[in-house]
Image (spheres, helix red, strand yellow):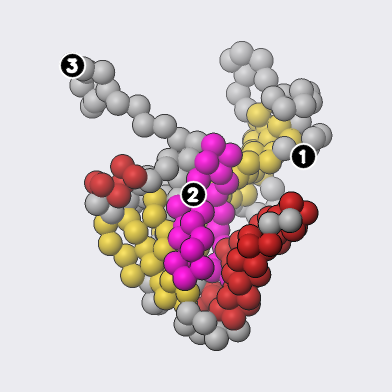
Amino acid sequence: MTEGEKPRVDVGEADDIQVISLGDCPICGGKGTLKAMQYIHEIPYFGKVMESTIFCEKCGYRNADVVMLEDRPPKLYSVKVEEEKDLFTRVVRSKSGTIELEEIGVKIEPGPAAEGFVSNVEGVLERVRETLLMAREFKKQDGDEEAVRRADEILEYINAVKEGKKPLTVRIMDPLGNSALVGEKVKSRLLTQEEIDSLSLGPYVTVEPEAGEDPEGSS
């Protein structure tokens, strides 16, 4: 995209899906192959959410995020999964969201390459299961029997949770307020400043105003 040129917007089959041409891919150098797909929808009892995915049609590069379109404060959401229907609790996770699965000791913290997604608890467990299976194979090749045993225990627990035989406490925290759990059994509270300071922002950074600078701007 040349200087001064506006991005081209193509409206997809649905009125609320937009595909925006961003220009050349910074990964593979493909000419005009980098695009962004944006999908806006409303989650009942929560509000409007925009799912955005940047992708390259040539090399397959992909990066996704979720952004709340309504102001929400930094909060901690939690749910106790005790039966199969609890697995359908909606999970909205942005690039700055941290997920904790208490009983199995799993903590998913956002890093520089974090991706956002909208799923449910079952979908999150499947993501964890796939990651564990890969890690287990590597540890097995390294001869780390203790790590393999621990992975097997977690995988067994995940299967029991999916069958409604074991409980699981799921939490999600986001210092930017862009993540949440949505469901009948979900509980929430505001994050303390100490909790906010301890959480990762993922690929985002906080820019503090310089000394003497008016953060609201001056007239």
Q: How many marks?
A: 3
Q: As shown in the figure, which amino acid type bears the numbered disc 1?
A: Gly
Q: Is residue 141 visible?
A: yes
Q: Please report the bounds of the magenta region as a residue range.
A: 98-122
Where does the image place residue 122, in percent across and percent down from the top left? 59, 70
Q: Are marks 2 and 1 in contact (CB under 8 Å)?
A: no
Residue located beneath label 3 in the image:
212
User: What residue is drawn where x is 55% and y is 86%?
Assistant: 165
Q: Residues within 10 Å of mark 1 (few under 14, many from 20)?
A: few
Comes first in the chain, label 2 or label 1: 1
* Disc number lying in front (2 or 1): 2
Among the 4 quarters of the image, the one containing residue 128:
bottom right
Question: Can you say which quadrant of the picture contains the C terminus?
Answer: top left
SS at mark 2 in the image: loop
State the residue lying farthest toward the top: 3
Residue located beneath label 1 in the image:
60
Among the 4 quarters of the image, the one containing residue 149:
bottom right
Residue located beneath label 2 in the image:
109
Where does the image place residue 204, in percent across and percent down from the top left? 45, 35
Is 141 magenta? The answer is: no
Q: For this view, does 154 lie left or right of residue 217?
A: right
- The CA distance from mark 2 to mark 1 is 24 Å
User: What residue is drawn where x is 56% and y is 44%?
Assistant: 114
Q: As shown in the figure, which amino acid type bears the numbered disc 3?
A: Gly
User: What residue is drawn where x is 47% and y is 71%?
Assistant: 103
